[in-house]
């Protein structure tokens, strides 16, 4: 297919979706009933997604879902970019939570000295200056 989608076999639901899109074009007056009959017969006989493409090239939206471009998933790219971050960036991003965990541990080991909670604050200030 021309847009980079794999040419896959159509399901019954995808063929039904294509027929519904074609019906919308009849309702809006873009297709007459004779052309609708011809194209709907070809949709019913279609086996691959590429078989639908010539039936919709001269029509605007709505288009069948089998012909729509694949959605991009920015979260996946961002997640993989986070995993590829160098250790220095990971440490910089994790410094305040690590300092908070250390402060909590020190609080229990020093028997309740509240000054240890200044440690995460100090780390946050230092990290904000580095950025």
Image (spheres, helix red, strand yellow):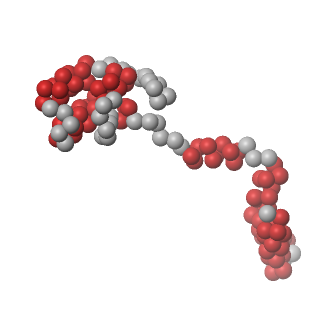
Question: Residue 89: x, y in percent?
Answer: 79, 53
Please state if 39 lies on the left or on the right of 74 as rendered: left
Residue at the farthest left position: 33
Residue 121 is drawn in which quadrant? bottom right
Specify the quadrant that holds the C terminus: bottom right
Q: Residue at x 68, y 45 (%)?
A: 81
Q: Residue at x 56, y 46 (%)?
A: 74
Question: Residue 22: x, y in percent?
Answer: 23, 34
Residue at the farthest right position: 110
1 over 86 or under it: above or below? above
Residue 40 is drawn in which quadrant? top left
- Frontmost residue, 44 versus 50: 50
Is residue 101 at least partly visible in the picture?
A: no
- Frontmost residue, 86 versus 116: 86
Please state if 87 lies on the left or on the right of 39 as rendered: right
Please state if 89 lies on the left or on the right of 13 as rendered: right
Q: Residue at x 17, y 26 (%)?
A: 35
């Amino acid at each position: 297919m021309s847009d980079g989608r794999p040419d896959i076999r159509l399901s019954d639901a995808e063929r039904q979706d294509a027929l519904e899109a074609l019906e919308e074009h009849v309702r809006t007056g873009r297709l007459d009933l004779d052309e609708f009959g011809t194209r709907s017969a070809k949709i019913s006989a279609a086996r691959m997604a590429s078989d639908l493409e010539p039936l919709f090239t001269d029509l605007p939206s709505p288009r069948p879902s089998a012909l729509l471009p694949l959605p991009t998933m920015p979260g996946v790219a961002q997640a993989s970019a986070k995993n590829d971050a160098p250790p220095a960036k990971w440490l910089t991003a994790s410094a305040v939570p690590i300092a908070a965990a250390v402060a909590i541990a020190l609080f229990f080991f020093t028997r309740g000295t509240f000054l240890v909670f200044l440690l995460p604050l100090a780390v946050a200030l230092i990290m904000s200056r580095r950025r």
